[in-house]
Amino acid sequence: MDVLTTIWADLAGQFLDPRKRLFIGYLLASLVIALVWMCLLQRYSPRAALRTFFARDIWASRSSRQDVICFILNRVLFRTLAPVLVTQLAIATLIFHLLHKQDILALGVLESAGYWIAAGTFTIFFFLLDDFSRFALHLALHRIPWLWAFHKFHHSAETLTPLTVTRTHPVEGLLFTMRSSLVQGISIALFVFLFGNQVDLLTVFGVNIFLFAFNALGSNLRHSHVAIRYPAFLERVLMSPAQHQLHHSEATRHYDRNFGVALSVWDRLFGSFHHSVAESMTFGIGHETGRFTRSVWSMYWSPFRDIWSRCRRRLQGGSVSGARLLSSRRDREA
Amino acid sequence: MKTRTLLLGFGLSVVAASAHAADIYGPFPVTLKGYQGEKTNSVSYSGQVARQLLHNSLKKAVSSGASLDEMNSYFNGSDGTLVLLDPKSSDSFKVDVTDINSVSKTNLSGKAYKGIISGWPGNMTGKEALESMISMAAETGGYDAKHGYDYTQLVSKFTMGGVFYHQACDNYLDEKMNADNKPNDKPYKDGAYYTGKEHSWDEAFGYWGAAAHGATMTPKQNYDIAKKKNMRDADANGDGLVNLKSEMNFAHAYYASGFDKGGKTDYYNTITRAFIDGRQVITDANGEKLTDAQRREVKRHARTVCSNWEKVIAEAVFKYAGSVYKNIEAVKATMGGNMWKVSGSSAESEHKAAVKKYAKYWGELAGFSLSLHTGGVNLGEIGVKMDRLVGMGPVMPDGTQVNGMSDGAYSVATGKSLDKFAVHMLKIQKLMADEFDVAAMNNDQISGIANLAEKLGSGTSAEND
């Protein structure tokens, strides 16, 4: 009973913690933004907008039901794993200690900068590094075949709802957790070393100010069927929900585009930028979708089976067709 | 002397009228069965006050480059007049003592810790370590620039621990609170007007070093009294003098008030009130042997005293580890990025001054950390870690560090890194935070990281984008 209570509390916590994407406040903000968008710009009546937003064929689809199961399974798994994972505190402490062994940056050299400069630069630096690292890991998940095997888990979603953000293979979840710890560790250690203990995170309701803005401005619509587009100039800086939906598109011309999260500048720098498009899209991983999502078990197990098949074929002097089982997304386009 | 006692009693009564009686240590009535004398107050700890004065004066003597004989007169005691060097009367802070022997003729050496202090070179007992420090202080004028030893700080801080903390928590509040040791139905010694338990408890209070009325004041008031800046609040009986026997704050009580000033801790009051409450339990036994329940209650107060006293010392270790850490950077800054490139007389003097300051803080750190071993608690692995991190000496800019003693001379290890030593200081702070639950955390160099990590929140999740 205690276990069930703990699991329930953890799941509920995902919707009650403003530091989480699925915080109820952000979900409501996204709903409001979506309805305003549909009513004002797409000329939907409020009733039609609501009906479209909560369309049964999206929210009750097989894909969305799988999202719910994955959400619960992943939470249970990560709650169990959390105590053994390396924390950002351990990494920050290690890096902080290592910084004492170099002579380029002096300890406390910026201590006189004052609170606002210290906190402001830390918050901006952390936001940029965090966003870039998400982009970089996401890029790697698409370009490196064995990582794509796991990331297919996320892209196998045929309908997108806010919960799809948690439709992630645990191996990918581990990578994202390690990324987060590393980015936090680097940022904290570097800034405390340079600015001393005055370093702070600028927050709104206890949440990183940038994270709050990103989420309050409709981040949950990235995984939705509401294709909110930004003006072209803005999409060149900030990733619109429609740009991320394009990232999920099955169309080969949209493969490996728009890896960014909050900022789209990384995609421009690395040549993967794509403006949003005014066309209807289907989501998934093409002909592999059916095989991959045959069952939830299959979704969790398939990546390992595919990697094993590839390794076995390699060892047996394998065939090209075998190797393609593990091709990256770009390979499939070719 | 009798007049002074009466005045003190009257003064404390006046203070008691305006403050809760439980906030003042004494007067407590004479409860000794069969006592026929005139004494009405059984509180007595003049021997401990004299040792507080010996310690203050010894510190002054070491810092002024006094001779070995003069320093030893304060450490071992001396016949005749023993001039009080600190606190001395000034226009703004008048004290009632000029000769320590007029308070009580005693010494520090006889009460120093007799166990081995493994964190100090030479495998010496606490007493021998203090003797060695004093002897080295005489040879070097108080500061050994080669090894980075500031003997003023080392002698002072380790005397506070190795004599005061040790005597109170490893003796008077420990074995002397046992049933058959210094029982409450007998005088402490033949002819005494106080019982065994009463006087044992009073002696421990004297080593703590708080003013009898200290718990009626704020940490700032107590701190300023110890700093000789607040005559008005110190002079509880209004006789125009600070009566050092009961109106002054010394040693660890002074440090406690310093930490409490920050508002996060209440060590001074917690300890002083536990002393008052414990003494009340003994007084309430009315000259009879303590019952098991009374002794349990007394021991509970003793535990409160000693666990908080230990924390006060751990807070000091934490604070000075932070000071050492910051001063390592200050020393490095005077080395121009390369320790061998200090040149020019002003740069060299600046460097020497920075090293001296660094050594001062290390001396405080070492004095306090060695003290933690002397309170009767076996620190085990924590103690070993602490000693290794603090080291037997500070790492010097040339990469040397004392690692032992041979034939009366320090031996040194070479190739040590100042940077690594700085990291040791961070680890000491973490050790104090983890193992002693320090809360004042002055000069904190580690919480910034933990606080930010907490604020950013755990990255453990299965979300992606």
Image (cartoon, coloured by chain):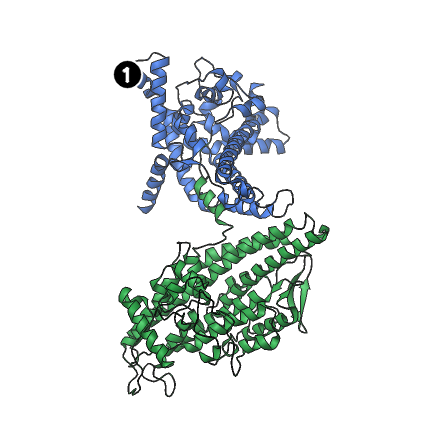
Query: Which residue: 63% across, 72% down?
Result: B138
Looking at the rendering, in which quadrant would you find the N terminus of chain B? bottom left
Q: Quadrant of residue B96?
A: bottom left
Q: Is residue A228 left or right of residue B296?
A: right
Which of the pair B369/A114 is nearer the observer? A114
Left or right, residue A85 beside residue A269: left
- Quadrant in the picture for residue A203: top left
Vertical relation: B167 (above or below) A284: below
Q: Name the residue carrying label 1.
A: A47
Count all numbered tags in the image, as a single digit.
Answer: 1
Q: Quick one: which residue is furthest to the front in this view?
A: B91
In the image: residue B204, left or right of residue B154: left
Q: Residue furthest top?
A: A43
State the image coordinates of residue B81 (x, y, percent, origin top left): 51, 80
Chain name for mark 1: A
Q: Is residue B385 depicted above or below B112 in this figure?
A: above
Residue B114 position in % (x across, y down) = 52, 76
Q: Is residue A14 visible?
A: yes
> Who's green, chain-wise?
B
Q: Is residue B119 visible?
A: no
x then y, percent, for residue A218: 40, 25
Q: Which residue occupies the foreground of this view, B7 or A195? A: B7
The chain that appears blue in the image is A
> Which kind of residue does numbered mark 1 sit on?
Arg
